[in-house]
């Protein structure tokens, strides 16, 4: 399995300038190649190949006066930019053929994009120095904060600059299959929500942190300050970075929460089942902000790849499974219910069910996991006895029987008296004494 590890970079002034040149040159080559291919397509000509574009837009362009500054950066960065364009076209055509979800055609890049990136391969001869710095060609040794060790030697490194002005080094490495966790007998179904972020089939409810809601006051304040700055001024650029940093703090906190929770669930359970939610559809409703704040898709993606990495089983059930309408005790479908109903009583078995926990148990059952319904924390209710079941039973027959000529009260009184005397006599008690349970007879 291929995994991506990101580490924070701290380039100095000259290194930031060199990285800005690398970002700009890679963007120009990408746009030139896209323009050449779109021009050929509009003219009905042959689609230019990557090798021809590399020779025309990189090798020959460096010799011209207009593109001579392309020689200031590593040639590997420019070649990888052409490969990125090939990947964008391939994904676009695969989406049209139905091989993957549809995506738009490649578009021109802007220098105002919130994310800039360049990639160095092994041919660029980048390396990690003895002192722990990242040595990049024509940029220098950049200081890195290593939060963990890499499991293997990476082949490529991507330098990314985000909207908040932070730099990151992203490594793609191959992991070995020896990271499988010890097997366990626990399985879990997960129902995702807004009030509670996740409800597990064992009754555990995890509160939703609501990172965006808690940071709304600060975000509004910074956004108002940004709107007051004159366009094109340095103060507006500074205010824009402050807004981007505030959003980055929210995104980082949410990602950390997802990582910790997904790792905990994968470590404690052998199999995990979740429901395939229609996030795009929910994002068009009045709950759009809360849905985006929860980040369900990112959390489910983490569960999926961590299950594959650590030898766990991951199940994703259909979104049209009626998990909230079926009683997890008797399996009877009781029909849809409004969202404000959090507890409901099954009309068949009389069990009082927690809506969310019941749905989590049904998610696990729909995935084929052996989850006991008693883990749903149902609360049985008292059901009145039927007419033919009332009274004390003796010799397999009900004591309350129909006696001709006697009223209902008399037959109950006499039958109860005979039953009590028989029970007291068999227990060795005399009238006026006490039965073994402490009841006076």
Image (cartoon, grey):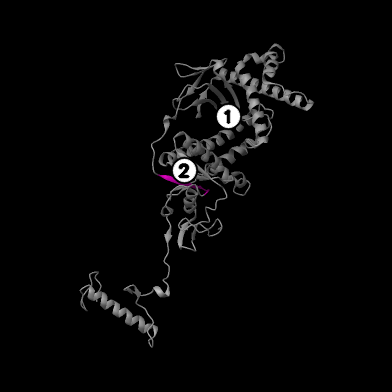
The image quadrant of residue 388 is bottom left
> Is residue 21 visible to us here?
no
The image quadrant of residue 75 is top right
Q: Residues within 10 Å of mark 1 (few under 14, many from 20)?
A: some
Say if 85 sits above or below 259 in the image. Answer: above
Q: Which residue is mark 1?
A: 162
- The image shows residue 374 at horizontal and vertical percentages of 41, 54
Q: Residues within 10 Å of mark 2 (few under 14, many from 20)?
A: many
Say if 236 sits above or below 75 in the image. Answer: below
Task: Return the residue nearer the eye: 192 or 326.
Answer: 326
Q: Residue at x 37, y 83 (%)?
A: 409
Q: Horizontal placement of 272 versus 17: left or right? A: left
Say if 270 sits above or below 156 in the image. Answer: below
Q: Which residue is mark 2?
A: 272
The secondary structure that dominates the magenta segment is strand
Q: Which residues are magenta?
A: 186-194
Query: Disc 2 versus disc 1: distance between alpha carbons?
Result: 34 Å
């Amino acid at each position: 399995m291929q995994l991506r590890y990101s580490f924070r970079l701290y380039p100095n002034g000259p290194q930031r300038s060199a990285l800005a040149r690398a970002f700009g040159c890679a963007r120009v080559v990408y746009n030139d190649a896209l323009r050449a291919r779109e021009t050929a397509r509009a003219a009905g000509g042959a689609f230019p190949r990557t090798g021809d574009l590399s020779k025309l837009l990189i090798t020959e362009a460096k010799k011209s006066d207009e593109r001579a500054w392309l020689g200031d950066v590593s040639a590997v960065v420019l070649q990888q930019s052409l490969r990125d364009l090939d990947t964008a076209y391939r994904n676009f055509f695969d989406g049209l053929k139905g091989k993957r979800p549809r995506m738009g055609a490649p578009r021109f890049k802007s220098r105002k994009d919130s994310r800039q990136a360049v990639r160095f391969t092994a041919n660029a001869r980048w390396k990690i120095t003895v002192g722990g710095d990242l040595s990049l060609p024509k940029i220098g040794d950049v200081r890195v904060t290593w939060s963990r060790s890499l499991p293997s030697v990476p082949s490529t490194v991507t330098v990314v600059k985000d909207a908040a002005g932070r730099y990151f080094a992203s490594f793609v490495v191959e992991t070995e299959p020896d990271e499988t966790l010890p097997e366990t007998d626990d399985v879990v179904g997960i129902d995702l929500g807004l009030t509670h972020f996740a409800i597990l089939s064992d009754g555990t409810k995890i509160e939703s942190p609501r990172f965006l809601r808690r940071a709304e006051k600060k975000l509004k304040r910074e956004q108002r300050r940004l709107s007051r700055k004159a366009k094109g001024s340095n103060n507006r650029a500074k205010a824009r970075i402050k807004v981007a940093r505030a959003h980055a703090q929210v995104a980082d906190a949410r990602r950390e929460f997802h990582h910790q929770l997904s790792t905990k669930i994968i470590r404690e359970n052998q199999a995990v089942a979740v429901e395939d939610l229609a996030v795009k559809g929910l994002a068009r409703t009045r709950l759009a902000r809360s849905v985006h704040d929860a980040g369900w898709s990112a959390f489910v993606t983490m569960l999926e790849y961590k299950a594959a990495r650590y030898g766990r089983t991951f199940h994703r059930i259909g979104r049209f499974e009626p998990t909230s309408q079926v009683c997890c005790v008797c399996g009877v479908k009781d029909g849809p219910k409004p969202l404000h109903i959090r507890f409901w009583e099954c009309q068949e078995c009389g069990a009082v069910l927690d809506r969310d926990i019941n749905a989590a148990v049904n998610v696990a059952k729909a995935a084929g996991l052996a989850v006991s319904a008693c883990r749903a924390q149902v609360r049985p209710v008292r059901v009145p006895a039927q007419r033919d079941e009332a009274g004390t039973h003796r010799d397999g027959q009900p004591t309350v029987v129909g006696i001709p000529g006697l009223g209902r009260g008399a037959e109950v009184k006499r039958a109860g008296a005979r039953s009590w005397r028989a029970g007291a006599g068999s227990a060795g008690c005399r009238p006026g004494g006490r039965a073994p349970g402490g009841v006076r007879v």
